[in-house]
Amino acid sequence: MRIVNVSEGYVLDTSAIITLIESEPGAKRVKAVLRQETVWLPWIVLLETYYISRQERGEAEADFRYA
């Protein structure tokens, strides 16, 4: 999981988002960053999250997570 601190906030990668939605170890840290800091979420992270979710959980779950 990578959460990168940049001068104007944090950039989350796909593994940080998956960690959060799967309640994996580190999810509390991701939640804290989301609540307290400015967060940047690149569009490719959204696409990767959708793709991984669809492969592992099916289209309905991927659509739910993407919405």
Image: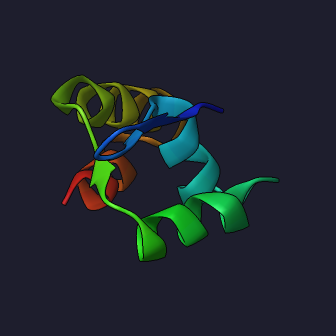
Relative placement, left or right, of 60 versus 6 is left
Name the residue at 28% across, 46% down.
8
Judge whether 31 appears above or below 7 on screen.
below
Residue sitting at x 31%, y 59%: 38
In depth, the one of 59 and 40 nearer the eye is: 40
- In percent of width and height, residue 42 lies at 23, 32
26 to the left or right of 13: right
> Quarter-wise, where is residue 23 in the image?
bottom right
Position in image of residue 61 (x %, y %): 38, 54
Q: Position of residue 60 (x, y in %)?
A: 31, 53
Which residue occupies the extreme bottom position in the image? 35
Q: Quadrant of the N terminus?
A: top right
Residue sitting at x 27%, y 41%: 41
Seen in the picture, residue 24 relative to 16 is either above or below; the reply is below
In the displayed structure, does residue 47 sit left or right of residue 14?
left
* Labels in figure, total: 0
Q: Residue furthest front?
A: 7
Name the image colouring.
rainbow
Residue 19 x, y percent position in the rendering: 63, 48
Q: Is residue 31 left or right of residue 60?
A: right
Judging depth in this view, the residue of 53 and 33 nearest the camera is: 33
Image quadrant where one finds the C terminus: bottom left
Give me the residue at 56% from left, 69% from top.
31
The picture quadrant where one finds residue 64 is: bottom left
